[in-house]
Structure formats: C-alpha cells, structure tokens
Image (tube, rainbow, N blue to C red):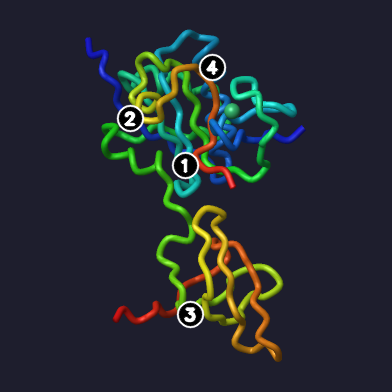
C-alpha cells in the first residue's frame, strides 16, 4: 500500500480543463476519495493533472464526469510537473531592441521595435515601424512574437 | 458573478474581498487553476506553500 503521491494525467475535451478540475474536486469530496490536488496549467491544453496515491481511484472518479475522457497510462512524479507551478512571465525572452510582430489586437500584423519591457506588469512598450509618427504604444507581452533579438555585444 | 483571483495569495474566489487576506485587490485576469484538496498530504500544496484547501490561480495579471 503506497501512500506516496503520484501524478496522473487525464485527457479532457479541449477547453474543458477547468470544468473537469472543478467536477473532479466535487466528486472527490463527496466520495471521500484520496485525491490530494488537481492541476490545470494554462499551457496544457486537453489535459488535467491529478495528484493521488493510485490510478484506480482517479479512474473511478472520472467515470461520471462529462468531458473527462480517460486516464493516461502510467504516472509522473512531482519533479516532472513542478515547472507548471511557476509559470514564466510572458515577457521573458523579449528584450529592449528586439524586433517583434504584434499577433493580436488593433495593431495585429504590425512590426515594431521594443523600447521598454515591464516584467512585473507583463507589458512592453514598442514603436511601430510603419507608423507615420513613431508614437510608443504599450501592449501586453503575450500579444507579440519575437522576430529578431537584439544583438548581444 | 465571475470568479476573480486575489493578487496577494492567488486564491480564486467570488465576492469583493479575499476571505484570507481581507484585501479587495482582486483580478479578473487570471489563468491556470490548482485545486488543493488535502494540503497535509499533497506535494503540490507543499511546493506552493498552501496549507488550507482551496482553489488557486497559477498566474494573476
Ligand atoms: Zn488573498
């Protein structure tokens, strides 16, 4: 009888990760199952991670949950999923002087040079190349794609 | 009412104040979800420093 936590992966319908997590928490409380934590990282589409000592009870719990499709064979340990607990700031990798392309919003498709990076607020200030007047605009760091990094010298 | 996340402890909640921090510094822009059911035996809870069962955002803007 192992009491150690393992991490099991449940396949879910896309975009139902949160609803599956909530439903699994409800079932676990109601049935007094030994499910210790449920994790749904934003970057992991179509899967939910479950911390429990064994697969059988997780498999049982998901039977009545819509959008929870199946438990993936095998298990992971905490070290393998730990990086999900510390999401990287979205502006990591964007530097002053980088050339970026805006990927959403009113300036979608525009190219710009990064003037300033605000890691705390996850925003960057850029100057659009094609603007008639180069006015700096501040946009969210997750709405751009880096085309060229500043040369390191 | 849409769920919000506390900017201080990342707790996901409804209402105007965080029941633990007491703050009204809440955000509607949060992502990732972790539900801690058994903090005493959860490794994830230990990594996050959580000791009360609850729901938390992984990231709050
Ligand atoms: Zn709080």
Element type where label 4 sits in the image: helix
User: Is there one chain holding both mark 3 and mark 4?
Assistant: yes
SS under mark 3: strand
The reply to whether dot 4 and dot 1 touch (C-beta < 8 Å) is no
Give the class, few, some or many, for how many residues have Cα within 10 Å of label 1's Cα (few <14, many ≥20).
Answer: many
**Residue denoted by label 1:** A41
Left or right position of B53 against B45: right
Which of the 4 image quarters holds residue A47? top left
How many marks on residues?
A: 4
Q: Work out which quarter of the rendered image holds the N terminus of chain B and state it.
A: top right
- Precedes in sequence: disc 1 or disc 2: 2
Host chain of mark 4 = A
Q: Earlier in the sequence, mark 4 or mark 1?
A: 4
Cβ atoms at labels 1 and 3 below 8 Å apart: no
* Pointer 4 residue Cβ closer than 8 Å to ligand 1: no
Asked if disc 3 and disc 4 are in contact, CB closer than 8 Å, the reply is no
**Which residue carries the number 3 mark?**
A99
> Mark 2 packing: few (<14 Cα in 10 Å), some, or many (20+)?
many
Subunit ID for the residue under disc 3: A
Q: How far from the left and from the top, in percent, is residue A22?
A: 57, 27
Q: In the image, are marks 2 and 4 on the same chain?
A: yes
Mark sitting on residue A27 = 4
Q: CA distance from mark 1 to mark 3?
A: 29 Å
Give the spatial CA distance, label 3 vs label 4.
49 Å
Distance of label 1 from label 2 (alpha carbons): 14 Å
Q: What kind of element bears circle 1?
A: loop
């Amino acid at each position: 009888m192992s009491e150690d936590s393992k991490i099991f992966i449940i396949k879910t319908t896309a975009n139902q990760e949160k609803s599956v997590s909530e439903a699994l928490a409800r079932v676990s409380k109601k049935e007094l199952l030994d499910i210790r934590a449920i994790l749904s990282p934003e970057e992991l589409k179509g899967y939910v991670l479950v911390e429990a000592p064994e697969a059988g009870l997780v498999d049982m719990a998901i039977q009545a949950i819509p959008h929870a499709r199946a438990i993936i064979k095998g298990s992971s340990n905490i070290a393998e999923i730990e990086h999900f607990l510390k999401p990287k700031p979205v502006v990591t990798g964007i530097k002053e002087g980088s050339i970026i392309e805006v990927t959403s919003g009113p300036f979608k498709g525009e190219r710009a040079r990064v003037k300033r990076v605000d890691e705390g607020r996850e925003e960057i200030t850029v100057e659009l190349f094609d603007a008639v007047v180069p006015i700096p605009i501040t946009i969210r760091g997750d709405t751009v794609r880096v085309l060229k990094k500043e040369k390191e010298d | 009412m849409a769920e919000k996340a506390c900017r201080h402890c990342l707790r996901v909640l409804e209402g105007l104040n965080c029941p633990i921090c007491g703050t009204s510094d809440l955000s509607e822009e949060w992502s990732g979800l972790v539900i801690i059911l058994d903090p005493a035996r959860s490794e994830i809870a230990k990594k996050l420093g959580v000791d009360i069962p609850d729901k938390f955002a992984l990231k709050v803007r």
